[in-house]
Image (spheres, rainbow, N blue to C red):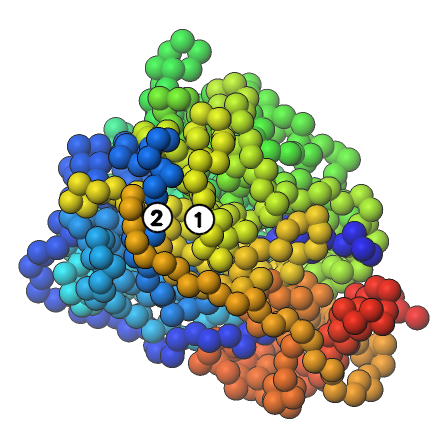
């Protein structure tokens, strides 16, 4: 048990018990379009197409339409980076994850924070120009698979566009933050849809997808008129009810690859929750499609099949939404191997011929080079440790799966796990060097089928929890039974050649859940990591040339920009997201900074000769109080463990050990113990993000969850005091 490593890779957040602070809730409304004369944020298609001519700005999500996240700025370089220091910082008033990429245009910075809040600040001083709160209902946290995060806004023709967690697309005046219009993007509000990704803009249109596959939704991407918010087209990524007419011809093609089952009732999945890239060369929109719902194909499509367009890159006509081509990275995806990770566009010589290519490092561990004109696969090399497949066959374009890792009958450790070899944290593409800089990870999960399905052959969708097809209620027991064969989790920053599959250098990081990157013409790669260190690496060697202790773990990608002749580098701090399930890590994975100190949501901005000082925080008091008298039976605690695994662990952490974002239930005081059932069943703290679970849990079940939490707390308290050799961690299959 001493080797237990609580760093299992699985998407997390939003369905567990939550006592943290969030915003006051409101209700989504549709606003009428108002008269508008733009004066700030005057970005148009031509400016973004020609972004290289204004290197001091960061005009779109990936800086340019090609989304390479490579900056031509050179003032901060190998020789000068030692003088980099803090220019200013801004506290965001939240302890939740920060994932936004700021937009910088004409000395103004626009960015988002948790709960879909939007800020405009002076990029040189940090002074707030305006802020906007869409007032997402606090209980919506339960509907989010992976925290109440937002990855950024789009700025276009004097407007700022943001997707809210509760599914609205909102247009704001870039000068004032006033709401111009708001549209509801969700097709079925009985399902747990969310938006966490950044919109994209082009040709007078705003493009947005959604999340929610784990809760059983059907994926799609929608184009809206940038001026009015009117819907222009919608492309579904998986087929719906086969007894109904197909929404567009591509769904007829896709439906032939789904075989048996009732996927349309369970959901299907295929959400477009992150990667959306516009290509002006072909007027194409490339979308990255997510995993199936549930994850296990044998449940959603028992007859097999590729299950299009799950885990695919799909090229659409940007004006009409009709499909041009697709490439499926993981046919019949069985492991949550989404293809929603960032995509970049480049012109590269491949096999002696110049090609316009698309580059992606999706979750499955293979790096893909694809011809943008026709979708032809050119390269597929592993960039991390992979055991689910031996290789990708370039002739067929299909991965060759490892049959020994089929988990239908027996649980197996799989690499990558559902957190992926690379997740949404942005990579950077250096075309001149022919390299991609990837925040990669080895993060396994033990895959095992749901006991319900194994016993009955039937899987019933539960709208109140993840619907993966895997057994999470008894996950701790399964983990302990197989811990000796668990691959070691680790994180690393790697320089990767997408054509040869070689890595000139790799830097290992003691924790796996690290931030995105940006590379520069100054010879640097910037990244923030889980240990709270913001670093500049030599892009040629991987040597650390500069570092700054932020005391907070980071996920967001840095950007760099210029104001009045001075180059700045900025990054948002604060971790969370999909890793909350993993909870508190144990060696050999290092403890991350947000668990040691706090999860400070901040925007940090650096320049050469900056004079601002960041406060040094005190360490958290993580001592566990003596627990109330426990009178529960082993069976009651075991029942509580099952329900905790199904409904609570995704936020509050495996074995009731929080990862430092959502409150740790082991350290509850007497007052919280007294109101525990009211919080969980009645939604006593709904406005603070902890929705009621009375639709899926009984009073007896909640009482047993409470028993389990107290039992776990007492185990860990006694272990810390040296009174027991090791906690048992699970009561399933008890004595």
Which residue is rendered at x = 63% and y = 80% of the image?
A: 668
Residue at mark 2 to residue at mark 1: CA–CA distance: 8 Å
Q: In the rendered view of the protein, which quadrant contains the C terminus?
A: bottom right
What residue occupies the far right of the structure in this picture?
Answer: 735
14 above or below 63? below
- What is the crowding at mark 1: few (fewer than 14 residues within 10 Å), some, or many (at least 20)? some
Q: Are marks 2 and 1 in contact (CB under 8 Å)?
A: yes
7 above or below 178? above
Q: In the rendered view of the protein, which quadrant contains the N terminus?
A: bottom right
Which residue is rendered at x = 57% and y = 84% of the image?
A: 679
The residue labelled by disc 1 is 548
Q: Secondary structure at mark 2?
A: strand
Which residue is rendered at x = 73% and y = 42% of the image?
A: 487
- What is the crowding at mark 2: few (fewer than 14 residues within 10 Å), some, or many (at least 20)? many
Q: Earlier in the sequence, mark 2 or mark 1?
A: 2
Residue 618: x, y in percent?
53, 67
The residue labelled by disc 2 is 85
Locate residue 497 relative to residue 324 in the image: left or right: right
Which residue is rendered at x = 27% and y = 49% of the image?
A: 103
């Amino acid at each position: 048990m001493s080797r237990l490593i609580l760093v299992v890779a699985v998407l997390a957040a939003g369905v567990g018990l939550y006592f943290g602070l969030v915003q006051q809730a409101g209700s989504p409304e549709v606003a009428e379009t108002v008269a508008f004369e733009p004066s700030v944020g005057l970005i148009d298609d031509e400016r973004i197409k020609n972004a290289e001519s204004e290197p001091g700005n960061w005009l779109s999500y990936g800086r340019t339409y090609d989304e390479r996240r490579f900056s031509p700025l050179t003032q901060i370089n190998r020789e000068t980076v030692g003088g980099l220091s803090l220019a200013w910082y801004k506290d965001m008033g939240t302890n939740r994850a920060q994932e936004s990429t700021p937009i910088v245009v004409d000395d103004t910075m626009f960015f988002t924070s948790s709960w879909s809040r939007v800020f405009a600040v002076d990029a040189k001083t940090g002074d707030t120009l305006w802020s906007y709160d869409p007032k997402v209902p606090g209980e919506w946290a339960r509907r989010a698979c992976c925290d109440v995060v937002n990855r950024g806004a789009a700025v276009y023709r004097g407007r700022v566009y943001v997707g809210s967690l509760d599914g609205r697309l909102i247009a704001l005046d870039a000068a004032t933050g006033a709401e111009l219009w708001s549209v509801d993007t969700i097709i079925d509000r009985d399902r747990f849809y969310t938006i966490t990704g950044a919109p994209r803009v082009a040709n007078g249109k705003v493009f947005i997808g959604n999340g929610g596959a784990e809760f059983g939704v059907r994926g799609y991407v929608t184009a809206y008129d940038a001026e009015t918010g009117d819907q222009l087209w919608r492309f579904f990524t998986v087929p719906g009810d086969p007894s109904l007419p197909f929404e567009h011809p591509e769904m007829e093609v896709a439906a032939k690859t789904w075989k048996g089952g009732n996927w349309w009732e369970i959901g299907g999945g295929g959400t477009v929750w992150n990667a959306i890239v516009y290509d002006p060369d072909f007027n194409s929109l490339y979308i990255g499609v997510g995993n199936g719902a549930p994850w296990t194909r044998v449940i959603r499509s028992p007859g097999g099949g590729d299950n299009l367009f799950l885990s695919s890159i799909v090229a659409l006509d940007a004006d009409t939404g009709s499909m041009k081509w697709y490439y499926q990275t993981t046919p019949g995806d069985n492991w949550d191997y989404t293809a929603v990770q960032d995509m970049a566009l480049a012109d590269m010589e491949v096999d002696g011929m110049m090609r316009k290519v698309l580059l992606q490092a999706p979750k499955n561990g293979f790096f893909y080079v694809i011809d943008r004109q026709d979708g032809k696969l050119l390269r597929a090399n592993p960039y991390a440790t992979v055991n689910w497949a031996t290789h990708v066959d370039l002739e067929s374009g299909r991965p060759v799966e490892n049959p020994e890792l089929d988990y239908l009958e027996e649980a197996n450790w799989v690499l990558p796990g559902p957190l992926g070899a690379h997740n949404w944290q942005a990579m950077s593409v250096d075309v001149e060097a022919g390299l991609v800089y990837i925040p990669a990870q080895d993060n396994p999960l033990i895959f095992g089928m749901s006991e319900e399905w194994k016993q009955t052959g039937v899987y019933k969708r539960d709208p109140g929890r993840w619907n993966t097809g895997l057994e999470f209620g008894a996950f701790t027991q399964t983990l302990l039974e197989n811990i000796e064969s668990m691959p070691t989790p680790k994180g690393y920053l790697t320089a990767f050649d997408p054509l040869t599959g070689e890595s000139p250098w790799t830097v290992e990081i003691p924790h796996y859940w690290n931030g995105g990157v940006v590379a520069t013409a100054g010879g640097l790669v910037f990244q923030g990591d889980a240990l709270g260190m913001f670093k500049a690496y030599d892009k040629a060697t991987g040597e650390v040339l500069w570092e700054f202790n932020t005391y907070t773990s980071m996920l967001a990608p840095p950007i760099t920009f210029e104001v009045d002749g001075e180059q700045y580098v900025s990054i948002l701090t604060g971790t969370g997201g999909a890793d909350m399930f993993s909870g508190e890590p144990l060696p050999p994975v290092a403890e991350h900074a947000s668990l040691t100190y706090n999860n400070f949501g901040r925007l940090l901005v650096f320049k050469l000769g900056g004079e601002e000082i960041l406060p040094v925080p005190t360490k958290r008091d993580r001592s566990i109080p003596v627990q109330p008298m426990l009178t529960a039976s082993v069976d009651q605690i075991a029942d509580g463990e099952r329900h905790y695994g199904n409904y609570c662990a995704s936020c509050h952490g495996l074995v009731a050990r929080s990862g430092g974002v959502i409150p740790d239930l082991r350290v509850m005081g007497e007052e919280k113990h007294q109101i525990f059932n009211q919080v969980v069943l009645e939604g006593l703290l709904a406005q603070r993000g902890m929705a009621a679970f009375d639709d899926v849990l009984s009073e007896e079940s909640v009482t047993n969850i409470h028993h389990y939490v107290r039992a776990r707390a007492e185990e860990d308290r006694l272990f810390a005091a040296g009174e027991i050799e090791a906690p048992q961690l699970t009561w399933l299959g008890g004595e």
